Amino acid sequence: MNYLLSLVERSLDKILIALFLIMVASIVWQVFARYVLGAPTIWSEELARFLLVWVTMLGSAYVLEHGGHISVTVLVDLLPLPLQRLIEFIRDSIVVCMSGALAFYGYGFAVSGARRVSTGLNVQMSWAYAAIPIGSLLIALFILGRRAAR
């Protein structure tokens, strides 16, 4: 299990770097085309928006795996260790349930996006919406994997 999670995490690292670089290049091209060439493009702005959704959802799972999300633990740190573990379990259970709900409804949203086509890139909107269930499932996977490792 740890090997699988490690493989997913390493792959996610490379995917996020690639998506972020493509997003930055798209934004730079949009600025260059608009202000230097005087001919803005529709596709570059749309691509940047779609990639922002992907980077946000996948990046959220990646940051969760590395413990980088903001948390206020002042009160929890004052509790005895068994209560701290209980609160962590409750917190993780809530996040897994919310991730499951987000993945479930996000999947329905992505499926419904197959009927719509984006204006700039001329691709099905389900490609952009698929980031929601995939990112949510990765969040749940990382939490469950961390729980199993304990």
Image: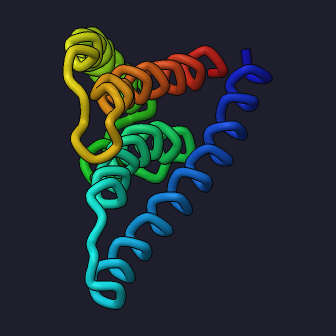
Toward the right, the furthest residue is 3
Q: x and y percent of residue 50 in the render?
A: 33, 45
Q: Residue at x 66, y 20 (%)?
A: 149
Left or right position of 147 against 119: right
Q: Look at the image and tell me in which quarter the C terminus lies.
A: top right
Q: Nearer the viewer, residue 46 or 88?
A: 46
Q: How is the image coloured?
A: rainbow
Q: Residue furthest bottom?
A: 36
Q: Is residue 11 left or right of residue 24?
A: right
Counting labels gives 0
- Residue 55: horizontal and vertical position, in percent? 43, 47
Identify which residue, 41 or 6, lies in the foreground. Answer: 41
15 versus 38 height, above or below? above
Quarter of the image with the N terminus in it: top right
> Where does the image place residue 115, in percent across and percent down from the top left?
21, 15
Decide if residue 38 is on the left or right side of residue 88.
Answer: left
**How far across and down, in percent of the image, does residue 34 sit?**
28, 80
Compared with 11, 49 (above or below) is below
Q: Residue at x 35, y 90 (%)?
A: 36
Name the residue nearer the viewer: 143 or 13: 13
